[in-house]
Image: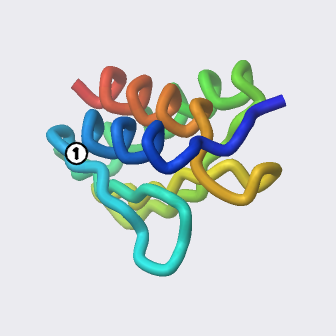
């Protein structure tokens, strides 16, 4: 089972993701990023790829899609905040978006 990141590990993780656009969610122990693609097909294709990865990880994002924009929030509900699962999924999302 995942464990909630302690303050030091959380700060390090968020800092490592900040360069690629991930940000803290105000009032919640979560991170957020807006992905913008060339068009709807690319956005939906990326979401499909991420869905397969997330299912294999048994860790699913909160997300929404409007045309070419996908809003993503990551947190591990079982632990009430960020875990290594969120960091790993964020990194995989970034790689798939390239």
Locate residue 10, reporting x and y percent: 46, 44
* Residue found 54% across the figure and 51% down from its top: 74
Residue 37 position (above or below residue 89): below
Q: Is residue 42 left or right of residue 88?
A: left
Q: Residue furthest bottom?
A: 27
* Residue found 61% across the figure and 32% down from its top: 85
Locate residue 91, reporting x and y percent: 39, 27
Q: Quadrant of the C terminus?
A: top left
* Residue found 35% across the figure and 23% down from its top: 96
Locate residue 39, reporting x and y percent: 24, 48
Locate residue 45, reporting x and y percent: 43, 33
Can residue 41 be seen at all in this image of the molecule?
A: no
Residue 90 position (above or below residue 24): above
Q: Is residue 48 left or right of residue 33?
A: right
Kindly identify which residue carries mark 1.
Answer: 18
Q: Quadrant of the N terminus?
A: top right
Q: Nearer the viewer, residue 70 or 14?
A: 14
* Residue found 64% across the figure and 56% down from its top: 81
Can residue 46 be seen at all in this image of the molecule?
A: yes
Q: Nearer the viewer, residue 5 or 35?
A: 5
Residue 68 position (above or below residue 18): below
Secondary structure beneath label 1:
helix
> What is the crowding at mark 1: few (fewer than 14 residues within 10 Å), some, or many (at least 20)?
few
Q: Tally the marks.
A: 1
Q: How is the image coloured?
A: rainbow
Residue 50 position (above or below residue 76): above
Q: Nearer the viewer, residue 17 or 59?
A: 17
Q: Nearer the viewer, residue 54 or 39?
A: 54
Q: Is residue 21 left or right of residue 10?
A: left
Quarter of the rendering containing residue 3? top right
């Amino acid at each position: 089972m995942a464990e909630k990141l302690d303050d030091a590990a959380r700060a390090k993780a968020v800092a490592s993701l900040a360069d690629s656009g991930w940000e803290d969610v105000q009032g919640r122990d979560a991170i957020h990023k807006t992905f913008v693609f060339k068009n709807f097909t690319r956005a939906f294709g990326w979401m499909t790829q991420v869905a397969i990865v997330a299912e294999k990880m048994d860790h699913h994002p909160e997300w929404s899609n409007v045309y070419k924009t996908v809003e993503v929030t990551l947190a591990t509900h079982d632990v009430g905040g960020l875990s290594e699962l969120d960091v790993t999924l964020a990194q995989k999302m970034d790689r798939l978006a390239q």
